[in-house]
Amino acid sequence: MGTSSTHHNGLLRFTTAGSVDDGKSTLIGRLLYDSKSIFEDQLEAVEEASKHKGLEVADLSLLTDGLRAEREQGITIDVAYRYFATPKRKFIIADTPGHIQYTRNMVTGASTADLAIILIDARNGLVEQTHRHSFIASLLGLNHLVVCVNKMDLVDYNEATFHEIVSQFKSFSSRLDIKDITFIPISALKGDNVVESSKNLPWFGGSSLLHHLENVHVGADRNMQDCRFPVQYVIRPQTNENRDFRGYAGRIASGVFKKGDAVVALPSGRETVIESILLGEEEMEIAFPPLSVVMTLQDDIDLSRGEMLVRKNNQPKMTTELDAKICWLDSRSLNPSSRLIVRHLSQEVQAKISEVLYRININTLHRDEECREIGMNDIARVKIKTASPILADPYRTNRTTGAFILVDPSTHATVAAGVIG
């Protein structure tokens, strides 16, 4: 872990989102470059490639875009995870492309993040993608948003331009459920305010982006109250010395489990006590999210995949009717009569969408109750009927047990991501 300050701030997972040319690649390149998180040979390759393009300065977007020639022909799809560290903190960046058809990547990238960076081009102000990405960050329960107003060099570092964008964003975001929003004017290309504060922005009293990322406090965002341990599989070694061993493997979704705790197995309702918790070969007295562990129980209970260990006086809801917000990801529109599969934790259940309540207009955040047609990238509130019960919590209180995806059983494609409640 290194110094105590590293330990104190821990790991920050953040996601970056913006429209196609808002400068995400350059921003990430600049963070890596100015915080000395790239290797000499990478830097030389970037400088070499930049010279080939006839550029005076190194094109830092090449760091993220992978120095690929084929990038000229196609669009880079998918979520790329990058890791870097400063003496104060370790970081994982989920970089998600800005093209509208890749909303699904924003959903994937943001689902494990603590914070989202939304990039806005100072010349264009808020665009539909700004609204969409901010709404998804709010929907996915991110408590921290950093709005970077980029390309300030192209508007002569004008203070009024920055404040105009801030007030536009504030009037939009007042309807979002995000507790902490920070606004920072930057130029990723020139390096203003990304890692170091900038002389070009003397009117800005706040800190640089990296300083903010190093110091933002996200520890309390994990749910340590509600104990939820979904069983992924049962371990029964068929060897002589371990003939009676029966362990339940899974990843702790939330809450803290201790050896000797009284627990209830759901859906059966059988009560028992945790006999041991194993992390690999090591016995643990205590375990918490997101550790993957094996638990053994004092009683011989017949637990199987998809079942859950919880506390007696703190249980999830067992239900066959989900009230949820979904982001539709499939290129074919939602067909309410089609059969789907809900994949929730380690459970897979047949389901169908029984009702579309309304679609959300992404630009105004108003509910469009007339519109029942749900197409790609639309966000809607729906009711889902499942063939067997699901053990779920509202997403607001539990990001792990409150989220699910919908899968098309015929193509196995993920057609939507959803949050409960």
Image: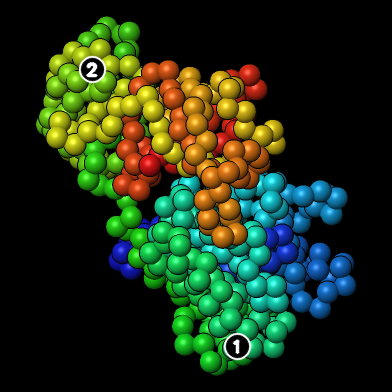
Q: Tag 2 or tag 1, which sits nearer the N-term?
A: 1
Q: Nearest to the eye among marks 1 and 2: give it.
A: 1
Whether residue 348 is situated above or below residue 345 in the rendered picture: above
Element type where label 2 sits in the image: loop
Q: How is the image coloured?
A: rainbow
Numbered disc total: 2
Say if residue 290 shows up in the picture. Answer: no
Q: Nearer the viewer, residue 20 or 377?
A: 377
Q: Which residue is mark 2?
A: 268
Element type where label 1 sits in the image: helix
In space, the residues marked 1 and 2 are separated at their CA atoms by: 62 Å
Q: In which quadrant of the rendered view does residue 149 lie?
A: bottom right
Whether residue 160 is situated above or below residue 302 in the rendered picture: below
Q: Do the CB atoms of the residues marked 1 and 2 lie less than 8 Å apart?
A: no
Crowdedness near tag 2: few (<14), some (14–19) or many (≥20) residues, C-alpha within 10 Å: few
Amino acid beneath label 2: Ser
Q: Residue furthest front?
A: 370
- Residue 381 rendering spot, x and y as whole percentages: 49, 41
- Residue 40 rendering spot, x and y as whole percentages: 66, 65
Amino acid beneath label 1: Ala
Q: In which quadrant of the rendered view does residue 291 lie?
A: top left
Q: In which quadrant of the rendered view does residue 142 lie?
A: bottom left
- Residue 55 rendering spot, x and y as whole percentages: 83, 74
User: Mark number for residue 270?
Assistant: none
- Image quadrant holding the N terminus, namely bottom left
Q: Which residue is mark 1?
A: 160
Q: Residue at x 46, y 29 (%)?
A: 384
- Residue 392 rendering spot, x and y as whole percentages: 34, 33
Q: Residue at x 24, y 38 (%)?
A: 227
Whether residue 414 is situated above or below residue 192 in the rendered picture: above
